[in-house]
Amino acid sequence: MSNLSSLVRSETLAQQGYKAIRRAIRDGKIPRGQFFSESTLAESLGVSRTPVREALLNLYRDGVVEIVPKRGYRLIDLDEAAISEIRLLRVALEQIVVERLCKTATAEDIAELRAILNGASESREDMYTIDEAFHIRMAEMAALHQIRRELLSVRGKMYLIASGARLTSLRDENVVREHAELVDALEQRDQKTARRVITDHVERSIDAFVAARAELLKQSRLDRLS
């Protein structure tokens, strides 16, 4: 969990902590099954314990971490039933967003979404980050603020599925194509196509996470045997 400070951006301290810890989970910097404390994370982030505590409470509400009395925090361990539910919820939320945008998206909205996908965003570092910026911005454009919050929660749980795995070889090129196809459908106000594209996009992404999770578990078993 060292050097997490490089993940911190110019936002409020609590927002910095929330995003930095989610990225650390995503990138496998917080080991599964191990307890960690507010103090440990605060030191790694280079901030006080107060914003880290707030960030961890938000992640607890998201269902990403659990609090164990006298032990600290630990990442939630998702079983197959939980992953199945995450799949259903993510698809349902994203369908609502694109259906709304097919009715309300302006030319400026479409241009902004294309700009995000083309890298005209502070979040161009990797496909994970640009993907999140794109999906969260769609919810904001649709003025679906509760759904935006739920999407952050669901995406945090997705990061738990394959924490530490790199999915670039599985998904990057396909994600670019699927995003572009979705924006085209939104621009044309083609609700049927938008629903199909977003459903397939989410399903394929979760399939990739599940495949990466299986590979991680396989490698872990091999390491224990060696």
Image (tube, helix red, strand yellow):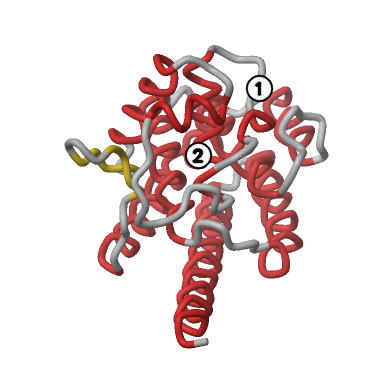
Amino acid at pointer 2: Arg
How crowded pointer 2 is (Cα within 10 Å; few <14, some 14-19, many 20+) is rated as many
**Which numbered disc, 2 or 1, marks the residue that appears first in the sequence?**
1
Q: Residue at x 48, y 34 (%)?
A: 100
Amino acid at pointer 1: Arg
Residue 110 % position (x, y): 71, 32
Residue 60 % position (x, y): 30, 35
Q: Residue at x 67, y 69 (%)?
A: 170
Of the pair 19 and 142, the residue shown nearer to us: 19
User: In this rendering, is residue 199 above or below 98?
Assistant: below
User: In this rendering, is residue 105 above or below 127?
Assistant: above
- In the drawing, what numbered circle is on residue 22? 2
User: In this rendering, is residue 191 above or below 217?
Assistant: above
Q: Residue at x 48, y 48 (%)?
A: 30
Question: Distance from label 2 to label 1 (Cα)?
Answer: 13 Å
Say if mark 2 contacts mark 1, CB within 8 Å: no
Residue 54 % position (x, y): 37, 20
Q: Quadrant of residue 217?
A: bottom left
Of the pair 191 and 81, the residue shown nearer to us: 81
Q: Residue at x 54, y 12 (%)?
A: 12
Q: Which element carries disc 1, helix, strand or loop?
A: loop
Numbered marks: total: 2
Q: In the picture, which quadrant includes the N terminus?
A: top right
Residue 68 % position (x, y): 20, 41
In the image, 57: left or right of 200?
Answer: left
Q: Which element carries disc 2, helix, strand or loop?
A: helix
How crowded pointer 1 is (Cα within 10 Å; few <14, some 14-19, many 20+) is rated as some
- In the drawing, what numbered circle is on residue 9? 1
